[in-house]
Amino acid sequence: MRQEFSERVRKENRIAFFSVIPVFLFHFLIVVLPSFNTVYGSLTNWNGLGTKDFIGFGNYRELMTDPNFLNAIGNNLRWMAMFLVFPILFGLLVGYVLSRVEKGRVALRAMYFLPYVISAAIAGKIFAAFFNPYFGINVAFESLGLDFLAKDWLAPAHALVSVAMVDMWHWWGFLLVIFMSALQQIDPMLYESAEVEGANDIQKIWFITLPSIKQTLLFIILVTMVWSIGTFDYVWVMTKGGPGSEILSTMLYKNALFKYRAGYACSLSVFQTLLAFLLFAVFGAVRKRMED
Amino acid sequence: MTYKKTIGRYTTFGILSLIALIQTAPLIAAVFNTFRSDGSIKKFPIGFPSQFNFANYAKAWVVGGYARAFGNSILVSFSATAVVLLASLIAGYFLVRSQLRIRNFILGYFGVALSIPVFSYLVPLYYSFSELNLVNSLFGIILIYIAINLPFNVLLARTFIFGIPKELSEAAIIDGCTTYQTIRKIIFPLSKPIVTTIALIVFVATWNEFTLANTFLQSPELKTASTKYVLFVGERGSDLSMIYTAGVITMLPIVAAFLALQNYFIDGMTSGSIK
């Protein structure tokens, strides 16, 4: 009996092993193995097609003196700064107000969330059409006498901010939903007892709402920082990272696929990953301290 | 007091509605422009159409090659969704119920894999796939979509199956079911809610995906709907009525699905990020 049982367990384990391992291996081969190859490729002068000649840290040394690279980092940081402020603040504020409205809540939430289900490829190109300097919203601004708003929105001087605005339009509704579900977890008794004590709205937000959603808020801040380093689709679709809106990812993409400098692209990728990891680690530590 | 409260409530509702209007205005203006002529859009970019004529749609559908592009999107998204669904439920089941020693390793692996960004593997993967003739191949992009959607959904399925009482699958095994019969007859039927969520997450993610599709599918006849649209705008950038119309055609299926299944979409697309 006992032997029969352990025989059965062994058979079960075999089935489990041969069911789980292929899933793991498949993912490993397509995602993780190439990631390791990226690290090796970054140490070579690989052009993508031929052989990889080992050149040590040559690519990294070149990065440090590439003005394009420094410019791209600056743009990623500007991007991050915008995303850390506007969508989070707006999502939180509107989410807070909306969660206290009964009528129309579901419909309003759906309208705020709608852009999030649309592909960056479509939204980006449609907005680019509206940003057309001659036939876009500028015509409307001029006829309304708002000439100061009639600019070439995707020209180098404004491109990064314009693209970020479109991406934030698409993103903040998602944050709103996340914040609303965090707000729902707050025990209404807390607010009631605060009211009994004579607290006003601002005090309620500061002493009850914010501390209660601290975990969610810190998580969103962390995600925003890491994603801002790797952001790509809206920028590529709208400007291809042209002058004024070059970021790390667009620079990497061009080197990898158009300039035949795959090795150099790999070093950008390693830098990007390390930077994201560093932010993750530093802010993770800050977050831990704030949560305790 | 009540009077003041009512005023306040209306003001709040008014502001919230105004924000909703501004949020959707670009899309509404785009839809209006699909019924206008190129000349009238160029005269003034925003405007109510004078007639509702679907001629632009018919033209954009044909010129944009949308029958083919939607066919590609449907094939890619359905295949990736089906495989991810099956693999997630099966792997999820064994990660909960089996006594495998490598179980914790696999769990940790997928946990870390969740946060691997596209650009950390894109370059070598592109050139390896190129050597394997998997660039410019729908099969190739399906393989990638399956892989990148596995970690999150395996973990999601695992969490769900964890909540299914152990006694149910044990009873099935005592009744003589094999492991896979148990999965098929007990786990699948009980997993309907998570099946819906996973299917929605993978379908929407692959349908809308840009970076990988743009990299791995370069020939026009293989492009998915949204990447085809980017190509279309590049080629016919001067005809604004076509740009707006083709854009609306491309986003129509997903927007219609969202409006019909709002709650599924919102719950699905935010699942996992909410604690």
Image (spheres, rainbow, N blue to C red):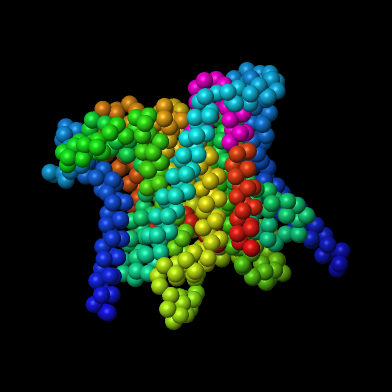
Image-quadrant location for residue A90: bottom left
Quarter of the figure with the C terminus of chain B: bottom right
Across the whole image, how many numbered discs are drawn on residues? 0
| Residue A247 position in % (x across, y down) | 49, 33
Between residue A163 and residue A208, name the one nearer to us.
A208
Between residue A15 and residue A187, name the one nearer to us.
A187
Residue at 73% across, 51% down: B105
Q: Can residue B83 be seen in this view?
A: no
Was residue B241 drawn as part of the magenta stretch in this picture?
no
Q: In this view, does B202 lie above or below A70?
A: below
Quarter of the figure with the N terminus of chain B: bottom left
Q: In this view, does A135 lie above or below B172?
A: above
- Furthest toward the bottom, the residue is A196
In this picture, residue A87 sits left or right of residue B49 = right
Residue at 36% across, 52% down: A114
Image-quadrant location for residue B34: top left
In this picture, residue A247 sits left or right of residue A290 = left
Q: Is the magenta stretch mostly helix, strand or loop?
A: helix
Residue at 28% across, 70% down: B9
- Magenta residues (range): A247-272
| Residue B83 position in % (x across, y down) | 56, 47
Was residue A257 drawn as part of the magenta stretch in this picture?
yes
| Residue A251 position in % (x across, y down) | 51, 28
Between residue B75 and residue A75, name the one nearer to us.
A75
In this picture, residue A279 sits left or right of residue B261 = right
Residue at 61% across, 29% down: A267
Between residue B174 and residue B31, name the one nearer to us.
B31
Q: Can residue B95 be seen in this view?
A: yes
